[in-house]
Image: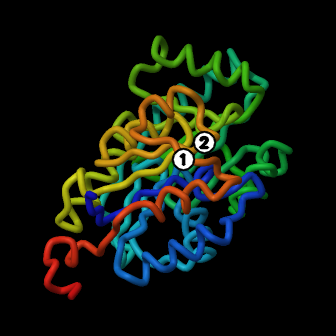
Amino acid sequence: MRTYSIVFLDIDGTLLDSRHQVMPCTQNHLRYLHGRGVPIILCSARPPGGVNLVARQVGLHGPMACYNGGLVFDENSTILRDVGIDPQLVLSFKQFVSERFPELVVSAYLYDVWMAEDPHHPLIQQEADISQCTPLGGSLERAADAASHVHKLLCIGDAMRIRALQNEIPRYFPQLMALRSKATYLEILAPESTKDKAAQVLLTHYGLAAEDAVAFGDNDVDIAMLEYCGLGIAMGNAPRQVKEAADYVTASNDEEGVFIALKGLRLKAPDAARNPEKTR
């Protein structure tokens, strides 16, 4: 049986159940692996605060990948990767959505700041309740002026309109990548903000190869990571295209799918995997 040395975990729909909690067996097993030196990397479209919230819940302390891999930190919170969307492109996209899809709500993320024109909008508040992040009131123009790039735009709304917008983006905004993190959420990112790129950076950080890695995911944003890592595991609640991209399909996020898959794998800390004598 192959030995793996690092685990990349999507958060929403994968690590978290439908109540946005980490189920007990999964939590205990991740703590056990973490205690044995196996890196457990949370890799999410969430901002740093939202990823840290889940890490604290599980009891993890280590690197993390935010904004779908656009912003990657090591275990000392040093930035290893930082890419995003040009501010002028942000404003052009917002104008396009306002004209063609006015019913969708667009908000912007840069580093650990989440900006929404109406932070009290029900759809923004719904996401705030899930992520436990607090939106700041402000225009996208203000967000675009605040930094050299914006890490992510989030479009929220009716699932059919979200899909319609996603279908329009290759034609009107080929410089952007649009991936659904769930049916009603469309993540707008720079094309290089992908979870496989984040995994590559962190594997280099640990001196590991792609075949040493296990990855878990449940939606379109996870496909590149599942295909890149040595073992890609789709959740039972994932749509068909994600399951087809994976090497293995586990149970759903409400059925301890992460725990069920992990307990059947051989996992050792990176140094132990390279130097078996240390484990004797």
User: 83 or 239: which is nearer to us?
Assistant: 239
Indicate the amino acid at tag 2. Answer: Gly
- Estimate how packed mark 1 is, as few (under 14), some (14 to 19) or many (20 or more) residues with alpha carbons within 10 Å: many
Indicate the amino acid at tag 1. Answer: Thr
Using the image, determine if residue 157 lies above or below residue 47. Answer: above
- The residue positioned 34% from the left and 68% from the top of the image is 267
Q: Which mark identifies residue 236? A: 2
Secondary element at tag 2: loop
Residue 13: percent from left, percent from top: 63, 48
- The residue positioned 59% from the left and 67% from the top of the image is 26
Residue 238: percent from left, percent from top: 59, 37
Q: Which residue is mark 1?
A: 250
**Residue 244 in the figure: left or right of residue 259:** left
Using the image, determine if residue 121 lies above or below residue 199. Answer: above
The N terminus: image quadrant:
bottom left
Mark pair 1, 2: CA separation:
5 Å
The C terminus: image quadrant:
bottom left
> Pointers 1 and 2 in contact (CB under 8 A)?
yes
